[in-house]
Amino acid sequence: MIELNPKRFVNAAAKARQVKLYVRMFAWRQYQSRTPQGHVYTVKFETKASGVYASCNCAAGAKNLPCYHVASVYPIDIAIVTMRQEHARQFEQPHEAHRSMPPVLVKPQPPSLGRINGMEL
Ligand SMILES: [Zn+2]
């Protein structure tokens, strides 16, 4: 895994600005990037407590070196993760709050009329 440290990604980011990649998301935080030469590389992101990490199956990424595939795809990943978090904040949390409410509210009951043969009336 490559730690996404901006200082290490200066050269990769510069190349990413020059080369136009075609990016396709195929799973959550997993992308395929296709170079103009037709090479396809898989870029994956993972957030850990210590930061964001990426992997790429290109020659540099296999050696855990920053590559321009990761540098190109990372802004897309940030945008998608941010949109997903915003959607969860707006739409899913109110539903979660609703689901956690008690399903039956206790209604006040009329006073008991007494008991006959052990049965409550
Ligand atoms: Zn790469």
Image (spheres, helix red, strand yellow):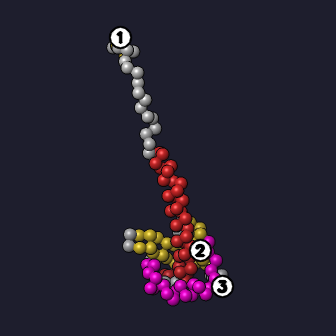
Label drawn at residue 37: 3
In the image, 48 versus 7, the foreground residue is 7
Residue receiving disc 1: 116
Badge 3 vs badge 1, beta-carbon distance below 8 Å: no
Indicate the amino acid at tag 2: Gln
Place of residue 40 in the rendered image (x, y in percent of width and height, measured from the top left): 61, 78
| Residue lying at 40% horizontally and 21% vertically, measured from the top left | 110
Q: Earlier in the sequence, mark 2 or mark 1?
A: 2
The span from disc 2 to disc 1 (Cα, nearest Å) is 76 Å
Decide: is 103 above or below 81. Answer: above
**Relative to residue 6, is residue 49 depicted above or below?**
above
Label 2 sits on residue:
32
Does the CB distance between marks 2 and 3 fall below 8 Å? Answer: no
Query: Which one is closest to the eye, mark 3 or mark 1?
Result: 1
Q: Nearer the viewer, mark 2 or mark 1?
A: 1
- Point out the image quarter for the N terminus: bottom left
The image position of residue 66, as x and y in percent, is 48, 84
Count numbered badges in the picture.
3
Nearer to the camera, 63 or 118: 118
Look at 52% across and 62% down and name the residue there: 86
Residues in magenta, as a range: 2-24
Q: Is residue 81 above or below residue 55?
A: above
Q: Nearer the viewer, residue 115 or 110?
A: 110
Q: Magenta span has 100?
A: no
Image quarter of the C terminus: top left
Packing grade of label 3 (10 A; few <14, some 14-19, many >=20) is: few
